[in-house]
Image: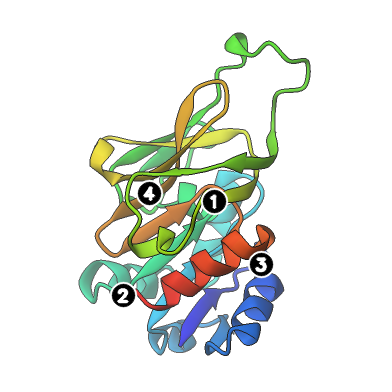
Amino acid sequence: MIGIVDYGLGNIRAFLNIYKNLNIPATAIRTAQELADADRIILPGVGSFDWAMERLDASGMRDTLDELVLRKKRPVLGVCVGMQMLARRSEEGQLPGLGWIPAEVKRFDESGFTQKTHLPHMGWNDAAPRAVDSLFRNLEHPRFYFLHSYYFLPENDEHILATTSYNGEFACAIRAGHVFGTQFHPEKSHQWGIQLLSNFAEI
């Protein structure tokens, strides 16, 4: 069972619809008890970093998430702000992140942009996988939908699973063991996102 963490943020219904069409069991998770039954976990997120962390803390699921991910090693996929929450901190806010991956979240440097409208980074972009197993299995020339002004900067380059170019290269997907993240929205990315979510279900 894939548990989609429903703490008031993210496109929960879009994830559930994709998994329903794939005939893969998935459910929205709203309590710590429900979360404990999930074999795999998706942590979506939209909006600002601090707001997302506050909502997650208020949900009553934070301690159980730490237990499942850090001790029991359940596979987890953070999406958009959900990926940024995996880091230790973000320039967007003051609250600490989950700290599951040694990383910081940085704001794009606007001084280097030449186009008039440059933030947020919004729309479709190619992704360049550094490994074609796990999330990117059976994905050729993948393209995904992005909407963000901050990017994930891991301390260890080995944690970068794929990159995208937007006024320079940045990590658009990361992996540290069983902990995964995508800066893009697979639930909005048509066949590429559907395949990626199917791949996560088999990890």
Q: Position of residue 201 (x, y in %)?
A: 43, 77
Three-letter code for the amino acid on which mark 1 is drawn: Pro
Mark 4 = which residue? 174
Q: Are marks 3 and 4 in contact (CB under 8 Å)?
A: no
Report which residue position mark 3 lands on.
8
Dot 3 amino acid type: Gly
- Nearer the observer: mark 1 or 2; the answer is 1
Q: Are marks 2 and 3 in contact (CB under 8 Å)?
A: no
CA gap, disc 2 to disc 3? 22 Å
Q: Sequence order check: which comes first, mark 3 or mark 4? A: 3
**Residue visible at 23% across and 77% down in the picture:** 72
Query: What secondary structure is marked by label 3?
Result: loop
Q: Nearer the viewer, residue 10 or 33?
A: 10
- Reading the chain from its start, which is encountered first: label 3 or label 1? 3
Q: Earlier in the sequence, mark 1 or mark 2?
A: 2
Is disc 2 placed on a helix, strand or loop?
loop
Q: In which quadrant of the rendered image does the C terminus lie?
A: bottom left
Name the quadrant containing residue 109.
Answer: top right
Amino acid under disc 4: Ile
Question: From the viewer's perspective, is the residue at label 4 or at label 2 nearer?
Answer: 4
Query: Is label 1 in a helix, a strand or a loop?
Result: loop
CA gap, disc 3 to disc 4? 24 Å
Residue 16, compared with residue 181, is above or below; it is below
Q: Quadrant of the N terminus?
A: bottom left
Which residue in the rendered view is the most extreme toward the right?
A: 116
Kind of residue at badge 2:
Arg
Please tell me the numbered disc located at residue 142: 1
Q: Which mark is residue 74?
A: 2
User: Residue 152 versus residue 122: which sits nearer the camera?
Assistant: 122
